[in-house]
Amino acid sequence: MRNFHVMWSKYGTFGILILLVLVLGLLSPEYFLTANNLTQVMLQSAITILVGCGEFFTILIAGIDLSVGSMMALTGMVTAKLMLAGMPIALAILLGGVIVGALLGAINGFLVNKTGLHPFIVTLGTLSVYRGITLIISDARPVFGLPQEFKEGIAGWIWKIPIPVIIAIGIALLLTFVTDKTKMGRNIYALGGNSQAAWFSGINIQLHTLMVFVISGICSGIAGVVMTARLGAAEPLAGNGFETIAIASAIIGGTSFFGGKGKIFGVVMGGLIIGVISNGLNILNVPTYYQQIVMGSLIILAVFVDKLFSLKKFSMKG
């Protein structure tokens, strides 16, 4: 049982992904296993991976961020407004996507620290606040007329690789370095594993709580910019429901809902699993609302399996 637990923790999500690809390939070999479709799966998964990587950090400290979808919409809208006001594209992306995203995440972290409320409550509130601000500054209308260079530079292709995929891989590699090779990463794991023990070890709880929400905000901001470029417009309702997708990619990828356990690689696998399922169900002409049932069921199953293995591990130690 111990060996199975170790193997599942390391390779379980990857095994599920391979199994899904094989099953859907057998069900629709003429469509699913084509190079164009598999590239499309990666393209569709890129935004999920980006926002899931941010969500990963908040779940890693046994918290959550329900405002990721609203932050995507607001950062995308601010970026579009800045470009239409004449700001250079690169500067608009930096200010509207990265810095505004970091600011929104910092507000979440500040409120969690100062109110003492669970992140679920705080981000449930900011979900509505950020969405409301997006609707106000856009007058509840999409913003069109974005520069062609922006669309091609963010949502275009380099050789035969979609640029959103390159961005998602780059962010995932950077965050993998943060979690595996930096003191901050080790402290975040310690905070998620046992916050009281982390405090006694001299870890600044409030600072690291603030940082995980800043990371979530930056990832959501980058995802918002990518989504805006892919749509060719800033939509005030963009990112609606992405909190569920972000949570699902992290949890399906092996991140423990109880904190202190998980890897960015697992989040990437979780995002690809969601992309494969969505793409496969579309190819098989399964109505989109059934996909919501599948997603919710996967979240419940993933948390149940995590809890089951945690109990098994505890009983083996005992």
Image (cartoon, rainbow, N blue to C red):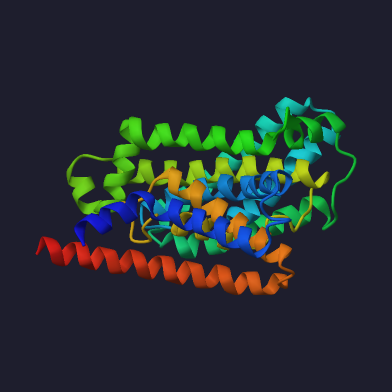
Residue in view at x 50 percent, y 58 percent: 19
Quadrant assignment for the C terminus: bottom left
Q: Position of residue 85 (x, y in %)?
A: 84, 33
**Which residue sits at x=45%, y=51%?**
14
Is 285 displayed left or right of 310 in the figure? right
Q: Quadrant of residue 221?
A: top right
On the image, the x and y values in percent for residue 186 come to 30, 38
Q: Between residues 89 and 42, which one lies in front from this camera angle?
A: 42
Q: Residue 34: horizontal and vertical position, in percent?
A: 70, 48
Rendered image quadrant of residue 3: bottom left
Q: Nearer the viewer, residue 299 or 201?
A: 299
Residue 165 at x, y percent in the picture: 64, 38
Residue 259 lies, with reference to residue 216, above or below; the image says below
Give the position of the N terminus as an image quadrant: bottom left
Q: For residue 113, say whether it is visible.
A: yes
The answer to whether residue 75 is left or right of residue 5 is: right
Relative to the observer, which residue lies in front, 149 or 33?
33
Number of marks in picture: 0
Residue 291's quadrant in the figure?
A: bottom right
- Residue drawn at (74%, 69%), measured in percent from left and top? 285
Q: In the image as oriented, which residue stretches furthest toward the left?
A: 318
Q: Is residue 117 above or below residue 41?
A: below
Q: Would residue 269 be found to the left or right of residue 189 on screen?
A: right
